[in-house]
């Protein structure tokens, strides 16, 4: 087996020092001379017509430079999500948003924005803008919103308040499958609205040049797609717009795939009105009320198996709460179905799903993108069937999980699966054999262990437009600059992508530096999301690295007068393959070995030799990366306090087939973070609204994120299946830690209490109530 | 003849609006939060040892953040000029500078620098730095400096105070040539020190990241070479350094090929000491005293011809005043000789030249780079020979000028010459036939007409390392971004390079935008100098444009199902060659023509079609452009006031063979600007020193630049020889307007007065004195 010099090593993160010392620059920190500050006036109503806006008094406040409303900003429809960019040729994107519209559709919707010399002045001005509203009926539940009597939020060709096409797919004949089943489980599950709650709120700083050029520093996860949207809104050629991170982004989790809510267009619109740079930083409350959430809603599952446990048929349905604007509500039901149907092998499967507009904060992308919703339902079904046929749920899963070569419903190959290994290793780690022996009769605390298995994607292709570019420019001193259009949203890709480059070329890690995502410095890239960054952008990086390596070796063969195929590069030294004195001459340039001709030369020396002959090595990688499923098995041990209803997750074993861990420390961090986010999803996180549609959980104080105190012991287990399609065998991992928490915690709570909860989060109130009902 | 859509048109400059409205950003305007301001303590002595520096009092001044001296900054030798980068493989660069040294070698040399919260505080702190000097003997004249008794300024292997190798070349046998000559002219000419006096003084803003990365906005003409120098000084990999213009540069004229004097390293050193961004902007006085000048010194010429005017032999020698540090003093004597020997055809030629260190401000590159010095001498020789053999000097030149195919001494082909056409057209424009009839006896004002002819280069190759890269990235809306590593130092290349791209691809001018020079956005480029930008970077732009065009047409052929060779692109529409309805469907995308299949499609539509299929067109041009001589003939009409000695240039006809004028308006601007700079060189500009070496002409008030009031009527005549090597036939023009003014004005003054001045500038004092002497 090939040994690696850089890949697979726990290399210290390139962003560690700057982040630990507080010197890392985020959009929120940006500051340019003459800059103005923006504040947004937001709708207090869930659904209303704007009859009039009077800004005359606000405009007169000293320090107020401009007030933007629907009357003085572009009337161009768009979608804050990158759905417009990602569109596959056969699908029309849903464009249902203006910067400001004459109708407000949720509490928090944008009405106007002020640019002023300070945030304080801007906030003061907001109070003096007079808006006359005509209230319209509102609807908040997706099932209600589809009814004939429900108010129309947007006119929709697909059905009443259904924003995008209904997703339908499957294989076989489910009627036949269920008819052949011995046992069938069928139920509906209810999912909450979760918030990404990333540390840095939505923010942007826009500067419009006198030549009409636009520069935007922002928190976007996708500079290039973000630019496409801005180009449409402001009718400006893309080549005159630059979107970049400055360079850091304080978390993403899907909340800014495309625009950072409306931070970018509001900042640009105000910069155009004032001729000054304008910065907008969402407050935490705004980030909660007016920035995409995870889709809540309903999932129905019907699963049938033979008495021996062989799965026969599955029917999966969903109706998700889109909120007031479409965002990714076309795509999310599709991924929910695709991931839900990809885990188990059976002949008959069908999916039917869509979103529904409501007068709620828009839902969009969030880590997992429908997959956690699907698995919460499916894994409950699997555990229930196991119980009914008297089979260990672990064995039932091992019997039915997809194997390489199985027919499945996804439009790309299942190139690898280490899921069985994941199940076995995680079961061992959690002590699966303890299950059933955990509780003593009459105990106040009930213990349980539950599991779940699943998959995800490593990329967005072929679900949408998807391609990556990487350029490695070898500088005249042999140092290398890797430019690739993906942000590092905190996931460590500014370390792992240079690792791939260094490994591929054959140099040390410190010989490669990386530029962050910036539309000016990199060709198109669809950005950081879909668990794709390492896998997909990495594919382009490896291609660029191979291009550089080839150029260097060809030039070296000529200079050294040695056949190309005899040459190799190790730790920055070009040498005859197998020649083992490379280290001895490291850094010393051209070396002679006795009577022999030149036996090795450092990359550094060779590169300068080439420079003096007018030559620079530039490697270019341009790929449309494929896709491949990562796999995961999660086991959770929980304690349910019967006196308070509190569910406490005490231990987690999370095994992930990531293909190959390019930087194991970073992979473990991704898994641990995902698990904790999943614990919150399963036990505490939810945005609820009052009767008028006003969100009630809009701060870190009110919205209950798990803290360090809530963190269970997490054992992250890496399984390496060496995927044939990924860079050095790697697959995605970013979202995967989040997919199974609700599913496995639901199963653990059932194991502890004997109660099946069809709705999360498993708050003390909800659990206590059910425990009390159960006693009766 | 092929007609062009964009090339050859007077397209409005892309920088016009921003510059005219004052919104264009220059380094001087840069401002980032937390920024400190630097001021430099400079030597009051021409040559001294620094015994001690006491900064203790200055450091205590509130607002002073750091004081840099030789004791706390890198002790790494460098050269502020790009000579280190440009080095040809066979030559060692001369590295003779530190940021601060223990010896000062001219009045204005750097001793220390302060970073403080304001320029005022920094300037106050300078007063409190106590420096103890031990004075050393100083020398200011290059001939004196070579004598054994002269002080050693730097130890030099090539000879006493001779910084670089002595340049010697030639062909034939000059002894034989002179022996066969009927008439021989021989004399020495004395040249002054001229200053570039560009509008924006040297400036830089440096920001050092906590990861050691360095960003420098500066006035450099050469971001990549500048970065190489900084990489050496600060032992930082080039890939961690970014050098860029912000984006404008307020003139160059050679003064910042490499570093902007020491603005960049001083700013970086202080940023490293303080952890803050540091800006330095040279005062006008500093720019005069401590920033490279044009080489003054001595040129000897010996020219022999037959009675019929056939040139037989030329011997050319030079000893130039290098000043205290080498800068481009290795290269300038070489170019002086190369250009001087390239104009006339003869069998026997030789050149011998070098620079000499003195305790003067360093000399470096300035528009013309030795060529004006050479031609002042040579053209005086030609006119004198013409007079001696009784031949019209115009006819003598026409008889002897180089023709395509002639043997010459330059290491690249003479691919085109329109010099004869230049001579004829300019002669006609000035009214050459009036010569000899201009003065009435006894007139107080003497009139004269003089001419000069010459050549220059269009690039730096093969004199040094030289290559260019251009990348054209087609954005998803069909707009295109051209990235090329050359600054626009005011010469209009941010308009003319996009013109080349648009013409080559077949789109309209407004479909191409350009990024300015920035080491992050572009691969290596040797920058803007050597009259090379349009010619050399243009060669890379055309190559990139052809690459894009090919990719678009290949994709279009596939989409349109039409053979590639039948397709063309005109004004942004891809169409069947010769199909003349392209305009009718412009912008409307795919068009059908009756029963025919698709006949045309806009680039915009095709590009989006490709994007939806994961494809982006990116054109890359990587060239080592050749070189080719531009040619020029200048005719000047002067008035010499015999009562005051004032020489007034009243009319100029300047004909230039530029190969092809890509933007005639810009070419004319270059010629006019060059002529006026030449008028200053010939008549008023000079930096003199007092006995202690202190420069006396260090402000716009004291240094006499020609103003608008001094500007003669200039007729710029464009001759197009369509050079086979240049983009669309273009050759260089940037420096050419400057090459012949002194030569032709010297000849015109002789024509007016009968007095041959062997020294410029022709100030009233100098002219009056000679007129008085002549009377005796």
Image (spheres, coloured by chain):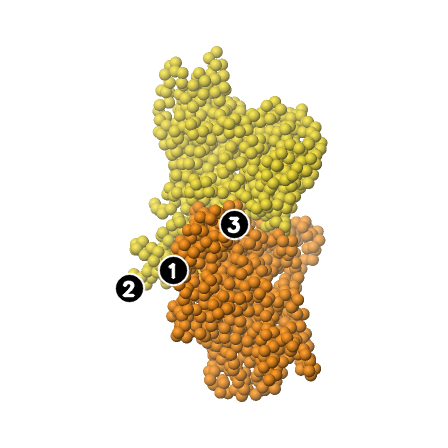
Chain colours: A orange, B yellow
Vertical order, A669 against B48 (above or below): below
Eye-nearest disc, 2 or 3: 3
Residue B541's tag is none
Viewer-proximal residue, B225 or A438?
A438
| Residue B468 in view in this figure | no
Residue of label 2: B595
Viewer-proximal residue, A419 or B67?
B67
Q: Residue at x 57, y 67 (%)?
A: A735
Q: Residues within 10 Å of mark 3 (few under 14, many from 20)?
A: some
Residue A51's tag is 1
Vertical order, B11 against A507 (above or below): above
Eye-nearest disc, 3 or 1: 1
Vertical order, A415 against B180 (above or below): below
Q: Of all residues shown, which one is farthest toward the left?
A: B594
Q: Residue at x 68, y 49 (%)?
A: A588
Q: Dots 3 and 1: beta carbons under 8 Å?
A: no
Q: Which corner quadrant holds the C terminus of chain A?
A: bottom right
Q: Position of residue B94 (x, y in %)?
A: 62, 37
Residue of label 3: A118
Q: Position of residue A213 (x, y in %)?
A: 45, 49
Do marks 2 and 1 share a chain? Answer: no
What distance separates the C-alpha of mark 2 from that of mark 3? 64 Å
Residue A548 lies in quadrant: bottom right
Vertical order, B216 against A225 (above or below): above
Q: Of all residues shown, which one is farthest toward the top?
A: B776
Q: Residues within 10 Å of mark 2 (few under 14, many from 20)?
A: few
What distance separates the C-alpha of mark 2 from that of mark 1? 53 Å
- The answer to which of marks 3 and 1 sits earlier in the sequence is 1
């Amino acid at each position: 087996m090939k040994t690696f010099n850089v890949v697979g090593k726990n290399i210290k993160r390139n962003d560690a020092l700057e982040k630990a010392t507080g010197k890392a620059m985020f959009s929120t920190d940006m500051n340019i001379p003459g800059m103005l500050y923006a504040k947004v006036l937001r709708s207090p109503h869930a659904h209303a017509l704007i009859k009039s806006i009077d800004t005359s008094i606000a405009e007169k406040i000293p320090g107020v430079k401009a007030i933007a409303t629907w009357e003085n900003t572009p009337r161009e429809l768009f979608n804050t999500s990158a759905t417009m960019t990602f569109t596959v040729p056969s699908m029309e994107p849903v464009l249902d948003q203006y910067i400001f519209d004459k109708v407000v559709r949720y509490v928090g919707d944008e009405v106007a924005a002020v640019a002023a010399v300070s945030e304080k002045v801007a906030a003061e001005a907001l109070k003096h803008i007079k808006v006359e509203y005509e209230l319209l009926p509102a609807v908040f539940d997706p099932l209600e919103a589809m009814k004939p009597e429900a108010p129309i939020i947007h006119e929709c060709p697909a059905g009443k308040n259904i924003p995008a096409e209904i997703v339908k797919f499957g294989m076989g004949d489910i009627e036949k499958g269920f008819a052949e089943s011995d046992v069938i489980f069928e139920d509906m599950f209810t999912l909450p609205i979760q918030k990404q709650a990333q540390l840095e709120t939505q923010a942007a700083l826009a500067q419009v040049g006198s030549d009409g050029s636009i520069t935007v520093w922002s928190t976007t996860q996708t500079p290039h797609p973000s630019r496409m949207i801005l180009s449409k809104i402001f009718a400006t050629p893309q080549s005159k717009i630059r979107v970049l991170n400055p360079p850091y982004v304080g978390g993403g989790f899907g909340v800014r795939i495309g625009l950072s809510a409306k931070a970018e267009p509001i900042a640009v619109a105000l910069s155009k009105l004032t001729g000054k740079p304008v910065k907008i930083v969402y407050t935490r409350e705004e980030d909660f009320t007016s920035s995409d959430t995870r889709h809540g809603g309903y999932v129905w599952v019907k699963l049938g198996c033979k008495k021996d446990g062989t799965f026969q048929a599955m029917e999966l349905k969903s109706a998700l709460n889109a909120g007031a604007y479409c965002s990714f509500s076309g795509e999310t039901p599709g991924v929910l179905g695709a991931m839900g149907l990809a885990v188990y092998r059976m002949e008959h499967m069908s999916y039917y799903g869509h979103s529904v507009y409501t007068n709620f904060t828009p839902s969009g992308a969030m880590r997992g993108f429908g997959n956690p919703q699907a698995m919460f339902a499916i894994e409950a079904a699997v555990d229930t069937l196991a119980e009914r046929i008297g089979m260990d749920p672990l064995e039932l899963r091992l019997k039915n999980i997809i194997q390489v070569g199985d027919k499945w419903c996804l439009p790309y190959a299942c190139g690898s699966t280490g899921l069985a290994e994941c199940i076995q290793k995680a079961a061992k780690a959690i002590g699966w054999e303890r299950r059933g022996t955990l509780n003593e009769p009459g105990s106040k605390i009930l213990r349980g262990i539950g599991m779940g298995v699943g998959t995800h994607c490593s990329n967005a292709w072929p679900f949408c437009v998807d391609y990556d570019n990487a350029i490695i420019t070898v500088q005249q001193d042999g140092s290398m600059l890797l430019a690739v259009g993906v942000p590092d949203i905190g996931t460590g890709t500014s370390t792992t992508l240079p690792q791939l480059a260094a490994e591929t070329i054959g140099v040390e890690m410190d010989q490669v530096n990386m530029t962050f995502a910036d539309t000016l410095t990199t060709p198109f890239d669809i950005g950081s999301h879909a668990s794709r960054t390492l896998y997909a952008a990495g594919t382009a990086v490896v291609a660029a690295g191979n291009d550089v390596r080839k150029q260097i070796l060809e030039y070296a063969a000529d200079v050294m007068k040695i056949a190309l195929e005899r040459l190799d590069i190790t730790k920055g030294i070009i040498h005859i393959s197998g020649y083992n004195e490379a280290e001895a001459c490291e850094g010393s340039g051209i070396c002679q070995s006795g009577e022999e001709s030149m036996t090795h030369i450092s990359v550094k020396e060779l590169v300068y030799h080439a420079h003096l002959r007018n030559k620079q090595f530039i490697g270019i990688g341009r790929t449309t990366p494929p896709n491949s499923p990562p796999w995961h098995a999660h086991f959770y041990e929980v304690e349910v306090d019967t006196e308070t209803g509190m569910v406490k997750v005490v231990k987690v074993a999370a095994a992930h087939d990531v293909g190959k861990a390019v930087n194991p420390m970073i992979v473990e961090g991704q898994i641990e973070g995902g698990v904790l986010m999943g614990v919150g999803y399963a036990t505490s996180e939810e945005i609820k609204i009052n009767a008028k549609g006003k969100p009630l959980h809009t701060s870190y104080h009110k919205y209950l994120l798990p803290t360090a105190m809530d963190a269970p012991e997490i054992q992250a287990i890496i399984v390496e299946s060496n995927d044939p399609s990924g860079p050095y065998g790697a697959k995605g991992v970013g979202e995967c830690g989040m997919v199974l928490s609700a599913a496995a915690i639901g199963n653990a709570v059932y194991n502890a209490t004997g109660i099946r909860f069809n709705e999360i989060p498993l708050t003390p109130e909800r659990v206590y109530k059910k425990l009390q009902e159960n006693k009766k």
